[in-house]
């Protein structure tokens, strides 16, 4: 093989190898940032991975919110009316967070099966429900229907 061809082949191989590494690293970084949504039923059935960052959504169970008076630690139960998952969160909850309302929490499952939330998102008005939560509740047949007054607004 003549030296000029050999040099071109080396350059092409170097470029192909470099592009392959760049694509591989990009795909790895993107896979680490994916936050899949799981309903309480899916979490209870073991479909959600442990220690992987996920989003969980549902309705906050009435009477389940317990606040630690010494810190910002809050625990509550999340349900889709079929299964219930315990959630623990340390931080300031959104102003619109309350029992009986739909939320989406981002975090991971610990080895006890408790969802350790790092972020809690609450709905922004009385008629809004996150699409993932609405889909999960609709599948369970427990989608709350708006009252006549709310429907006519």
Image (tube, grey):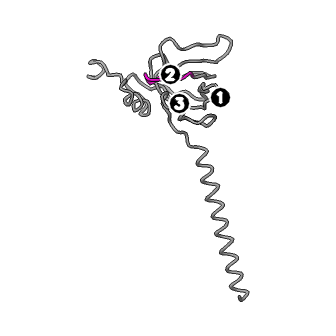
Q: Which residue is mark 1?
A: 111
> Where does the N terminus fall, quadrant-wise?
bottom right
Secondary element at tag 3 = helix
Mark 3 or mark 1, which has the lower sequence index?
3
Mark 1 or mark 2, which has the lower sequence index?
2
Q: Position of residue 114 (x, y in %)?
A: 60, 24
Cα distance between the residues tagged 1 and 2: 17 Å
> Where does the C terminus fall, quadrant-wise?
top left
Task: Name which residue lies at 49% across and 32% down.
Answer: 42
- Mark 2 crowd level (few <14, some 14–19, many ≥20, 10 Å Cα): some
Task: Name which residue lies at 59% across and 43% down.
Answer: 33
Task: Name which residue lies at 32% across and 21% down.
Answer: 146
Secondary element at tag 1 = loop
Q: Which residues are magenta?
A: 79-86
Task: Name which residue lies at 56% across and 21% down.
Answer: 86
Q: Is residue 27 magenta?
A: no
- State the mark number for residue 139: none
**Which quarter of the picture shows residue 106?**
top right
- State the mark number for residue 43: 3
Looking at the picture, tell me which residue is in the foreground, 84 or 19: 84
């Amino acid at each position: 093989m003549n030296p000029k061809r050999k040099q071109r082949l080396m350059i092409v191989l170097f470029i192909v190898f470099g592009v392959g590494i760049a694509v591989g690293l990009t795909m790895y970084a993107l896979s680490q940032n994916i936050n899949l949504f799981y309903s309480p039923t899916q979490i209870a059935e073991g479909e959600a991975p442990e220690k992987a960052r996920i989003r969980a959504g549902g309705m906050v169970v009435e009477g389940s919110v317990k606040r630690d008076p010494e810190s910002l630690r809050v625990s509550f139960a999340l349900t889709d009316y079929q299964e219930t998952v315990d959630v623990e969160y340390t931080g300031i909850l959104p102003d619109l967070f309350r029992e009986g309302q739909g939320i989406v929490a981002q975090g991971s499952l610990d080895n006890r099966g408790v969802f350790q939330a790092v972020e809690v998102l609450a709905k922004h008005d009385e008629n809004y429900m996150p699409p993932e939560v609405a889909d999960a509740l609709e599948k369970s047949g427990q989608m709350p229907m708006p009252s006549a007054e709310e429907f006519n607004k």
